[in-house]
Structures are given as structure tokens and as C-alpha cells.
Amino acid sequence: MPLDADGKPMVIPPMKNLRDNMQEIIDSAAEGGVEYLVCANTPINTMEDINSSIVVLNKTDEACKKAGLRFAYHNHDAEFHAVDGKIPYQLFLDQTTMKMELDLAWAIKGGQDPVELFNKNPGRFPLWHVKDLDSTRETIMPVGSGTINFKKIFAASETAGLKYYFIEHDMPKDPWESITKSIAVLKQLAPSK
């Protein structure tokens, strides 16, 4: 258990969520001057979960617009696995107007081609998470060290509506080496954002 500065166990408050704390979260984000509020996870295990999530995501998107924020959803690979024959991510695209923060590696691990997503949904992807994967799609690597064709993906950045991209590497052995390699590769491929 983590300890505070006095050596006492830290009490971590419950995590806020959009279903129960939407307006509070939006107000805090607006007060902080952020441009985008991003939802990083929502229940998708059943169709009931997905439908309830779509309601919350749509309400949040509308409330964000009223507050002068932009709202986006961040994927993992689970959103691309069928639930009762339907792909949650496609339902999000079809039944919401929110923007997407596409995690390129997780989309590819989920069997998707990011460029096809961009072409079918132009302008919906202003935010990207950029990391690479090995050929088994199990090991995260510095950008340019794995198997993802970033040249093809970044060539479609205008269609996607790309505004910002973020280098990401979950738990690298050497964070500085990973970020240095990733930045060097992206300087060659990516538009300045």
C-alpha cells in the first residue's frame, strides 16, 4: 500500500466516472483549460453495456460541447471484438458524433486497418496514440521497431482529421531509449502537430 509523506497509508478516493460524475468531470476539465476530454474505458461486455455506454457517451459529448470542450473516446483492442455479432467500436462510430482518440496499436491488434477507419469516418480521429507492436501483436515496442506501417497511417492523417498524436509505450524497460527512438522515427514520418 502506498504511503503518504507522513508514512501513513494513502487513501485513494474512488475513481470518478462519466455515468455518475459527468458534469463534475466536465466542469473540472473546462476550468483546467483542456481542449479535449477523453474517455479511456466504458463497459462493453454485453449489448446492454454497450447501449448504456452509448447513452452516456452521447450525453457527455453534448455536455462537453456546451462547456466548450471536445469529447473523444480512447480504444483498446477489446472494442473491436464482437459482442452478440456486433463490433462495439463500430457501434460507437455509428451511434455517436464524438471524436476518437485512436490507439493505433490496439486497433491493429483488434484486427483493424486504421486507414480504412479514417476513409470510412473522415475527420473523426483528431487524436492518436502511437506505439508499435511485434509480429505476435503481444509486445509493445518503440515506434519503428515493430511491424506497424506508420508511413501508410501518417499519409492518411489529413483524412483522419489528425490534430495531435501522442507517443505511448506501456512499461518500457528503458523509457528514455524508447521515447528517443520513437521521436526519431516520427520526425521522418509525421506532420508537425
Image (cartoon, rainbow, N blue to C red):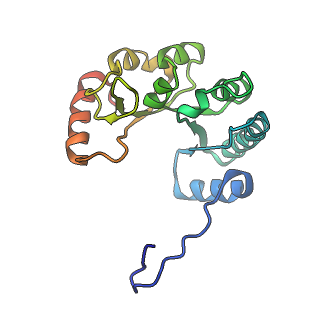
Give percent across and percent down for residue 16: 64, 59
For residue 146, above or below residue 168? above
Number of marks: 0
| Residue under the image location 21 percent in, 35 percent down | 181
The x and y percentages for residue 59 are 75, 43
Residue at the extreme bottom:
6
Residue 123 x/y as whole percent: 55, 22
Dividing the image into 4 quarters, which one contains the C terminus?
A: top left
Percent position (x, y) of residue 105? Answer: 43, 29
Q: Using residue 24 as the reference point, say whether residue 8 is left or right of it.
A: left
Please report the residue visible at 39 percent of the width from the left and 82 percent of the height from the top: 5
Which residue shows up at 71% across the image and 46% down it? Answer: 63
When asked about the image quadrant of residue 121, the answer is: top right
Residue 116 lies, with reference to residue 12, above or below; the image says above
Q: In this view, does 41 lie above or below 77?
A: below
Q: In which quarter of the image is the N terminus?
A: bottom left
Residue for point 56% across, 18% down: 122
Q: In this view, does 42 lie above or below 154?
A: below
Left or right of 54 in this view: 165: left
Which of the two residues, 45 or 185, is positioned nearer the viewer here? 45
33 or 13, which lies in front?
13
